[in-house]
Image (tube, helix red, strand yellow):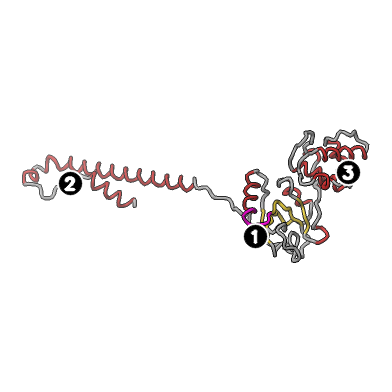
Amino acid sequence: MGSPSCARLGRVLSPPDSTGRNSRQANNTSTIAEPLVDLRIRSNLGAMLLCALVVLLCGCTSSSAASDQVISPDPMGGSNQPFDCNSDEYFVQVASETDEQAYISTVDKVRSSGQLPPNTHYVTQGGDCGIFTSARSSSTASRSWVLYAGPFATADAACPALLESPPDASIKGLRKESRQANSPCLCAVNIADIPVITKPDQTGQWVSEIQRSLLDVGYPITAELGDHPGQFSEATSNLVGKFQDAVGLSDTGLVDKTTWERLQVVICG
């Protein structure tokens, strides 16, 4: 489109051809030829410069428009990647739902809250090795749409992804004996990097971590919490106090650095 436009600009700005002018004008070429030639050159030069400016502006506009294009995020949260049922690896269950539309909505909420870890995939019934569904269970409660991160060689290797996930996320193994595991990550982190938990109803993945840790050392926190993982409720605080009392710490019910350190020693040795 740029070339025809430039040609038209040249025709508009260029002076008319002198062919066919009357003899008097022809006889006066000695006085007007040079100014006409000069005018033609300047006009054509102006047209060329104007054409170049138009092309430049059009090119910049196109480049700007291309750079301003927004790529929509994948509504599924990643590719469909079934589990390897013969693997010893682990994965992080980030979210799960019973149907596709509910799953897509949940993925959007997880992404919007900044709790979507990198390198996530999803798995559906038939590719989950029976971890979330089974042939004998056809109830709508079966989690047939699962968003996960992984796989990882060890449970500890899955911890960074877990700590970036929603509070109700968990680490699971692909082997039958580790599928129901809800491994804490205290052995894979530096205590200095862990925040203290001191406020009632404080929420987040670190609250989930204290809950997982208490469960791992023998406190049935899941039964007391019901459907509130990741919430520092009164029930959680009470169990923190029981653990503190059992290991010789002051029963404050709050998770300070000393409590984290003692839990790490008990769990990791």
Report the mark closest to the observer, 3 or 2: 3
| Of the image marks 2 and 1, the number of the one nearer the N terminus | 2
Secondary structure beneath dot 3 equals helix
Mark 3 highlights which residue?
265
Q: Give yes or no for contact between labels 3 and 2 (Cβ–Cβ under 8 Å).
A: no
Q: Quadrant of residue 192?
A: top right
Mark 2 highlights which residue?
16
Residue drawn where x is 27% and y is 50% of the image = 7
Secondary structure beneath dot 2 equals loop
| Of the image marks 3 and 1, the number of the one nearer the N terminus | 1
Q: Quadrant of residue 54?
A: top left
| Residue 83 percent coordinates (x, y) | 72, 62
Residue range in magenta is 97-102
Above/below status of 74 relative to 40:
below
Secondary structure beneath dot 1 equals strand
Left or right, residue 202 beside residue 107: right
| Of the image marks 3 and 2, the number of the one nearer the N terminus | 2
Q: Which amino acid type is shown beneath numbered disc 3?
A: Val
Mark 1 highlights which residue?
80
Above/below status of 80 relative to 258:
below
Above/below status of 98 relative to 52:
below
